[in-house]
Amino acid sequence: MLVVVALVAAAPRSPLIVVVALPILVLVGFLVVRLWRVGVYERDDGIAIGGLSGTSVLRWEQVSAAEVDAETYGFEPLPTVVLRCQDGGAVPLSLLNERSLLMRGSPGGVPGLADRINDAIARHHG
């Protein structure tokens, strides 16, 4: 908010500040909204995976299990939930790893998230 006030105050003296700062503020706002929506959500049609680039849905028929994997994902091995698919593929939930601020306050941490996803898979598979 302080940045916006400073830009408005400086605008009459330097329109270049507004031209440069406005796209930066829009980008920061977009990233804040996307980070707010990051997560894994249970829906009737499948598991919705919200990430920085958008939200994708894996249908319940596609997902076989959720596991904790620390071997292959990310820059440094961190326990991360990986969704295993029926076709043998894997979908890592990289933003929801052991050190992620998004996991703070999540009951049971990364293993707890995998357990909750597995419970949802079991409910929807019948």
Image (spheres, rainbow, N blue to C red):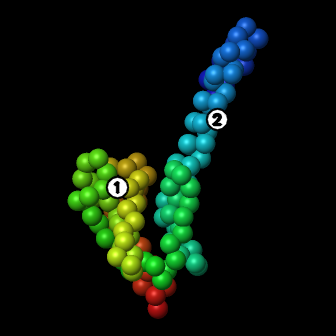
Q: Element under label 1?
A: strand
Front one among 106 and 68? 68
Q: Position of residue 94 (x, y in %)?
A: 38, 56
> For mark 2, does the 10 Å Cα neighbourhood hold few (<14), some (14 to 19), or many (20 or more) residues?
few
Mark toward the start of the polypeptide (2 vs 1) = 2
Residue denoted by label 1: 97
Residue sticking out furthest to the top: 13
Residue drawn at x 29%, y 47% is: 75
Front one among 33 and 87? 87
Tell me, yes or no, if residue 47 can be seen here. Answer: yes
Please, is residue 15 above or below residue 114 in the view?
Answer: above
Q: Element under label 2?
A: helix
Q: Position of residue 92 (x, y in %)?
A: 37, 62
Please, is residue 12 above or below residue 48 in the view?
Answer: above
Tell me, yes or no, if residue 98 can be seen here. Answer: no
Residue denoted by label 2: 26
- Answer yes or no: do the residues labelled 2 and 1 have beta carbons within 8 Å? no
